[in-house]
Image (cartoon, rainbow, N blue to C red):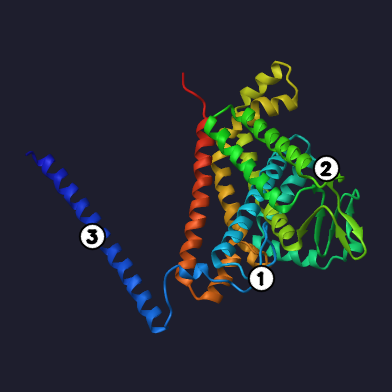
Amino acid sequence: MTAAEQLRARARYRRLGMQAALVVVTLLAVWGAVSNAQYNLTRLNMTSGFGFLERGTGWNYSFSLVERSINDSYAYTLFIGLLNTLFVGFICIVTTTIFGFLIGTMRDVRHPALRFAASVYVQIFRNIPLILQAIFLYAILIHMGGPRQAVSLGDVAFLSGRGAMLPGLNVSPTVAVALLLASLALGVALILARPVFWRGLALWAGGSLGLALAVALVLRPEGESLLSLPQLQGLRFTGGISVPIELFALIAAITLYGSAYVAEIVRGGLAQVPRGLVEAGQALGLSRAAIWSRIKVPMALRSIIPPLGNQWIFMMKATTIGIAIGFSDLFYITVNAISQSGQTLELIAMLMLTFLAINYSIALFTNWLNARLQLKEH
């Protein structure tokens, strides 16, 4: 064996020794933590395990997409919290992406007033902590007037201190949740089918809307219209979709904050499009809208998607600030479950694993989308 080979072998053995030592230290640390936790639980006469999930909670909370009662088990209550988190996260991802693209495009236009307004928006909402924005917005909304003093938007939507009343399909909440799950399933099926991105997006939007209208036509109450509009009757609104003030404030705060970051991502992506491609479009006589939709956006998406995926993951994690304004997301329900059951380790582990699975799924989707949008080599 030559001297060089001996040096490489020694270096390899040294790396293996360091890796083995790291594994041993990690195992000892985990063993020590588990042993210490078991000792403290025994000293406090507390039992470990997941048997508590079958017990009833005995407490209520503010919002749920499905039927609930105070006698529900911990497992069912945590499932409701998971649904609430996924619901808010999905809505915030959609709204922040849409508003972020609009504001980012405004920062790229030639009109100085639009660029200035977009820049002011980004600098304000990006530099104020999200939790402060949520609390401030919630404090403003809860001090609005009652239903009779509600702010009207075309007499089809209303906002008051009790929440927002919006028009919606005339179906039960359970059917609405089923439609949302069907829309997600359709999206997963289209992802597996791997169509062209814009075609797949159009198929998903059109299919979800068509399915919702078809189900509403079949399952609506007899003699009633397809849409349910909110109407003021006495001291409250009837009909439509009732959005609690906590949910409305949380979605609005995350959307305002997140869209400022998405706008910067979009502006940076549009700025990276080669000037020659834009000039080529102008030479072909394309309008500014056509250049934006056919040249700048398709090229910018290749640099926008990776950081945009990070923002999607952040939007999902940002739902945990709902605890500050009383919204019953998974984090809020987990904290209450810990205070009621005392099963801290089990509930924290479940919470971490749940968010790990959700955010890892978003990361996988982002990686797939980024790979589909990359330029193919010939």
The amino acid pointed to by label 3 is: Ala
Which is nearer the N-term, disc 1 or disc 3?
Answer: 3
Q: Is residue 166 above or below residue 184?
A: below
Residue pointed to by mark 3: 21
Instruction: Tell me the number on the disc at residue 60.
Output: 1
User: Are the two marked residues, 2 and 1, in contact with CB atoms closer than 8 angstroms?
Assistant: no
Q: Position of residue 270 (x, y in %)?
A: 63, 34
Q: Position of residue 348 (x, y in %)?
A: 48, 66
Which is nearer the N-term, disc 2 or disc 1?
Answer: 1
Q: Position of residue 310 (x, y in %)?
A: 55, 47
SS at badge 3: helix
Residue drawn at point x = 63 percent, y = 42 percent: 182
- Dot 2: few (<14), some (14–19), or many (≥20) neighbours within 10 Å? some
Q: Is residue 299 left or right of residue 5?
A: right
Which is nearer the N-term, disc 2 or disc 3?
Answer: 3
Q: Is residue 207 left or right of residue 373?
A: right
User: Are the two marked residues, 1 and 3, in contact with CB atoms closer than 8 angstroms?
Assistant: no
The amino acid pointed to by label 1 is: Asn
Residue pointed to by mark 2: 226
SS at badge 2: loop
